[in-house]
Image (cartoon, rainbow, N blue to C red):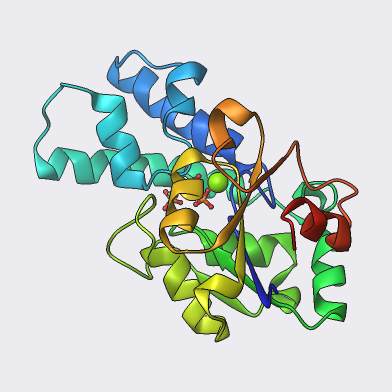
Amino acid sequence: TIRGVIFDLDGVLTDTAEFHYRSWQKLADEEGIPFNREMNEAMRGLSRRDSLLQMLGDRPLSEAEMERMMARKNEYYVEFTHTMGPEDLLPGVVPLLEQLRSRQIAIAIGSASKNAQLVVERLGIAPLVDAIADGHSVEQSKPAPDLFLHAASLIGVAPAECLVVEDAASGVEAALAAGMYAVGLGPTNRVGNAHAVLPNLDGVRWEDLLGKLGL
Ligand code: B16
Ligand code: MG
């Protein structure tokens, strides 16, 4: 049985993936670094630092320069989050959270983002969420299992009784490494390693999802 569900944030509950992309693109344009949407795909779910390293490729930068670039990218991103509100929740999110609450299933956020708390507040779902594990919680980011294991401990649920909902390959890997069930949202070439794959959360009924997981 599943007693806890851990939701990734960006790309699952809200489409901040687009804001992250635009922020990186702006930084890249200013720095004259070639970058585009396709390259951004490879950064989905990666931490801020891992994303920058991916963007830089073999252009070496000092630690100080990297820190400055990450700070700038974050400034652009935080600017975007100021415009966010409950209307930015993806379809099906609130109905699913409500189904879980009425079944006494614990709800956690497991996001690589250091801005997760801020975004959850802006989306207005803080009252529906029991715990937040974010980019400040653990050292090793996805695909390491640490973040999801931390989220599970916050809600007091054994990993084997947790289900992770993810949109990124790195997040699906992290869930499997944690010994949890995983639902992938998006194309199978991205999240096909998950136990079940859905296009998004729109219209999802909890019992149907359990069926897809063979539970
Ligand atoms: P920040 P998730 C991830 O969040 C994003 O998918 C990824 O694009 C971003 O680089 C990462 O958070 C770090 O975010 O710069 O705000 O700390 O998908 O794990 O919810
Ligand atoms: Mg994500």
Q: x and y percent of residue 29 in the render?
A: 38, 18
Please report the residue visible at 87 percent of the width from the left and 79 percent of the height from the top: 102
Q: Nearer the viewer, residue 191 or 86?
A: 191
Q: Residue furthest bottom?
A: 156
Please report the residue visible at 36 percent of the width from the left and 23 percent of the height from the top: 28
Name the quarter where the C terminus is drawn: bottom right
Give the left or right position of residue 70, taking residue 175 as reference. Answer: left
Q: x and y percent of residue 186 in the render?
A: 66, 34
Relative vertical location of residue 34 with respect to residue 94 in this rendering, above or below: above
Please report the residue visible at 62 percent of the width from the left and 48 percent of the height from the top: 195
Please report the residue visible at 35 percent of the width from the left and 41 percent of the height from the top: 72
Give the left or right position of residue 67, taking residue 211 as reference. Answer: left
Q: x and y percent of residue 6 in the render?
A: 60, 65
Name the quarter where the N terminus is drawn: bottom right
Relative vertical location of residue 17 with respect to residue 14 in this rendering, above or below: above
Residue 71 in view, yes or no: no
